[in-house]
Image: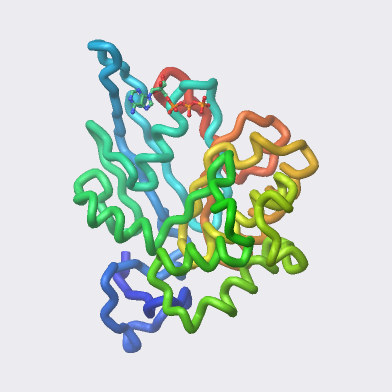
Amino acid sequence: MANWFRKKNTSEALAPEEVIPYEIHVPSRAHLDSPLLTVTGVQRSFQVGGERLDVLKGIEMELKPLQLVMLKGRSGSGKTTLLNLIGGLDQPDEGEIMFLNHAFHLGSDNERTLVRRKEIGFIFQSFALMPLLSAWENVELALRMAGVPRSQWKERVAYCLELVGLGKRMHHRPFELSGGEQQRVAIAKAIAHKPSLILADEPTAELDSQMGAQIMSVFRNMIATEQVTICMTTHDPTILEVADHVYEMVDGKFVS
Ligand SMILES: Nc1ncnc2c1ncn2[C@@H]1O[C@H](COP(=O)(O)OP(=O)(O)OP(=O)(O)O)[C@@H](O)[C@H]1O
């Protein structure tokens, strides 16, 4: 895999002669045939009341660029545990997780945090918005946290909120928005810093089926316009239908 760099705070690929130093070494998204993420032989256990609980027992998976990938499995089967590993929030006991050219199973907390801030966006079932901030301010906060220069905030916040269909609700606070609209603010937050991967844990679970379908349509639009890959968990069979690939977890492993 070629090891090009990206210009800071831009998502466009650079030709080799234009390469400039960048604190995180990220291959160009132009390499669409290489997997964005590979998970090999991953195991994760927890100590619960003096007993060992084996949750992930040898996970093999791959996320290809620009795909919408879904994880399904019964409650407690380990989907969130896996998302946490993929997002670099946790590390496996065994196995390998390669994200871009970063070995998440080996890196320190600090290294994973740096990669995560630049390259990953998270979306949660419960939206996780700051209740006293407007939609605009919530997205702006995400840019501030990601270290994006202030001069770029205005244009990017407006763009992201338009992208999720909230152009007319930018200055509303979460309690003035429907559940679906709040989740769209959360999506705008997650993509604001131009990550290459979005991880979403049950993003439609709190929404009715119509709002859930709208979120899926926003996800599809984001993949096309923002060149992201999305990996999400869901229990909803109608949502599963729009996936490019579904992994089903049974007894700590995927079944095909
Ligand atoms: N940090 C932890 N310490 C102890 N046990 C944990 C920890 N994290 C997860 N578990 C246990 O691991 C199992 C899998 O949990 P996980 O949240 O990954 O499941 P899930 O498939 O996401 O479930 P749901 O669909 O209900 O969200 C559960 O039995 C849970 O209690």
Tell me: 155 left or right of 81.
Answer: right
Q: Where is residue 70 shown, x and y percent of the image?
A: 56, 39
Q: Looking at the picture, does residue 84 appear above or below residue 196?
A: above
- Front position in the image: 177 or 111: 177
Residue under the point 45% across and 33% down: 80
**Residue in the image at 55% along x and 36% along y:** 233
Q: Nearer the viewer, residue 165 or 70?
A: 165
Vertical arrangement, residue 109 with respect to residue 256, above or below: below
Specify the quadrant of the image occupied by residue 25: bottom left
Name the quarter showing ligand 1: top left
Q: Residue furthest front?
A: 132
Quarter of the image for the N terminus: give it: bottom left
Q: Is residue 227 visible?
A: no
Task: Decide which of 38, 205 is in the foreground and name it.
Answer: 205
Q: Kindly identify the residue that appears in the image at 69 percent across and 66 percent down.
A: 170
Instruction: Decide which of 131, 86 is in the foreground and name it.
Output: 131
**Residue farthest to the right, as pictured:** 210
Q: Position of residue 59 (x, y in %)?
A: 37, 32
Left or right: residue 155 compared with residue 163 = left
In the picture, measured across the screen, residue 229 lies left or right of residue 98, that is: right
Q: Residue 49 in the image: x percent, y percent?
A: 28, 12
- Name the side, left or right, on which 132 lies relative to 178: left
Residue visible at 56% across and 61% down in the picture: 138
Q: How many marks?
A: 0
* Image quadrant where residue 237 sits: top right
- What kind of colouring is applied to the model shown? rainbow
Q: Percent position (x, y) of residue 98?
A: 31, 50
* Residue 234 visible to the viewer: yes
Q: Is residue 83 above or below residue 13?
A: above
Q: Residue extending furthest bottom?
A: 17
